[in-house]
Image (cartoon, rainbow, N blue to C red):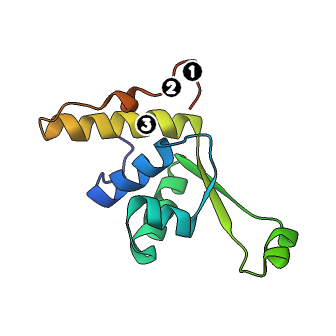
Amino acid sequence: MQAGLRMTMPTLAVLRAFLSDPLCERYGLELCELADLPSGTLYPILARLEQVGWVESRWEEPEAHVAGGRPRRRYYRVTTDGAQQAREAIARAYRARRQRVPGWVAGPAGGLP
């Protein structure tokens, strides 16, 4: 585990949300819904994951949010290393609870995130 990164249940929920489709970029509200967390819990977790390099982010182009008539979104994506680290962290959490590690934790075939 990365130094300074606590594997709390909310953090594990965010990691599971990313691993549900590791190649997909997700914005904050979408992650709140997937992880079933309020924004006040989600955003500090995203900041910590980004700080340790498990997640990267980008702001959407202004044309997209202006055309949609909504605020600008920040998109987050799990990194390749982050996906691997997340799988290992989730597996450790399951083992610590003496639960069977789900098959999806192993990741997709072919070496993609």
Q: Amino acid at mark 1?
A: Gly
Question: Percent from the top left, x then y, of residue 4?
Answer: 36, 53
What residue would you read off at disc 1? 111
Image position of 111 (left or right of 32)? right
Q: Quadrant of residue 13?
A: bottom left
Question: Percent from the top left, x then y, of residue 85?
Answer: 43, 36
What residue would you read off at disc 3? 85
Where 3 sits versus 75, above or below?
above
- The mark that comes first in sequence, 3 or 2, is 3
Towards the viewer: 103 or 82: 103
Helix, strand or loop status at disc 1 = loop
How packed is label 1: few (under 14 Cα within 10 Å), some, or many (20 or more)? few
Give the CA distance from mark 1 to mark 2. 7 Å
CB atoms at circles 3 and 2 under 8 Å apart? no
Question: Percent from the top left, x then y, of residue 70?
Answer: 73, 80
- Residue drawn at x 46%, y 28% as measured from the top left: 107
Towards the viewer: 20 or 112: 20
Give the number of the disc on residue 108: 2
Q: Amino acid at mark 3?
A: Gln
